[in-house]
Image (cartoon, helix red, strand yellow):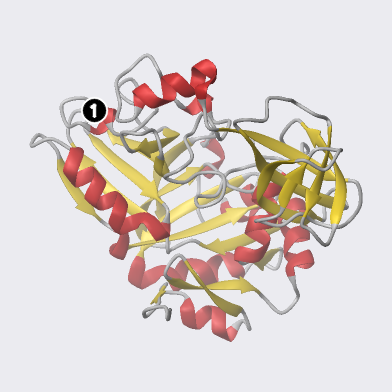
Amino acid sequence: MSQGPLYRTPLYDVHLKLGAKMVPFGGWEMPLQYPDGILKEHEANRKGCSVFDCSHMGEFLIEGDAKASGLDGIVTQSIAGQPVGTCRYGMALDPRGGTIDDLIVYRLATETWMVVVNASNIAKDAAHFRAHLTSKAKFTDISALTAKIDVQGPLARDVMKAIVPGIERLEHYTFGVFPVLGENVIVSRTGYTGELGYEVYYPWDKADRLWNAVMADTRVRPTGLGVRDVLRIEVSYPLYGHELSEDISPVEAGLGRFVDLNKEFIGKASLVKDAAGQSRRRIVHFISMNRRAPRQGHQIFSVDGAPIGEVVSGTFSPALGVGVGIGFFRKEFTGSPKEIIFGDEKLKLAAQAVARPFYKDGTLKA
């Protein structure tokens, strides 16, 4: 089945000039990697500074009281008491407890919110929010007006303070409105790579101005979706469509700390059952005993060869020098083995289950 026309970010031509390999992702034509390759991009993020074009992500503006608007009942995190100037990660669920999307809620003012959602889910999420917000809420999809550029890595603060004066005051999972190259815009500090990182929400038609200013620093390297996936797996962050989906609840994905069972929200009843041990699957993180990497769709076997689960994410970790993977044990499998096997009927490789994250030396909260 052929894919329809792909959307392009405002930096599409910039990526082409930099020699990026462009690929379809979530309905968008995005840079997979640049000519120097993923290993160089990985090194830039873990040791220096990298910049990502994340303009494909979606942004919703919601005005209204947290509870009266219905917003607090849509997301799994409690946001009614969330301080202005902070961000909270959570999920929107269907009544069965399946994950419609994972998202970040920004409290811009007492009754003003921005919700950042995944690119492939913008239309689905917008329909879900419109269906469940009350008449006391005002909903605006600002995705088409908003570019998003992420600057990540141990040197991110040093690079960005020349462009965003005062950025040093931002703590992890906070944001502010800053003057950036003539525009007053939201700059946050959340991150998706395990390193110190900032996100700048900039006017769509002026995104190249910000990108060029960041790239003018010789310490910065452009980075694509390929290395972003490696980086997020190394720190065990979920990616929608892999660790989370409409068939996978946050509790099953090991993300129960982002669910407030003390409040009411769509899908809560199912999550209560999951928390009580009635979930359909259990997440497992594992390290290959060699450099061979697990891949999505590989099976997980017990040491005696019985199929007990499936891999949802896997990669070779440049930071650790081995393959790392994330998967789920099936509900009927009740054990917690340290030694497992992954692969297919042709090739099976030994692995060891470990506690997450795989990579523990990041600068995320530096």
Q: Which of 142/229 is in front?
A: 229
* Residue carrying label 1: 66
Residue occupying image coordinates x 20% and y 51%? 140
The quadrant of the rendering that contains the C terminus is top right
- Residues 292 and 227: in front is 292
Q: Quadrant of the N terminus?
A: bottom left
Q: Amino acid at mark 1?
A: Ala
- Specify whether 38 is left or right of 264: right
Percent coordinates x, y for residue 248 in the rendering: 49, 40
* Left or right position of 333 against 78: right
Residue 17 lies, in percent from the top left, at 57, 85
Where does the image place residue 348, in percent across and percent down from the top left?
A: 85, 53
Question: Height in image: 279 above or below 7?
Answer: above
Of residues 308 and 4, the one nearer the viewer is 308
Side of 172 where 247 appears, left or right: left
Instruction: Work out which residue is located at the far right of the displayed protein and give it.
Output: 290
Q: Residues within 10 Å of mark 1 (few under 14, many from 20)?
A: many
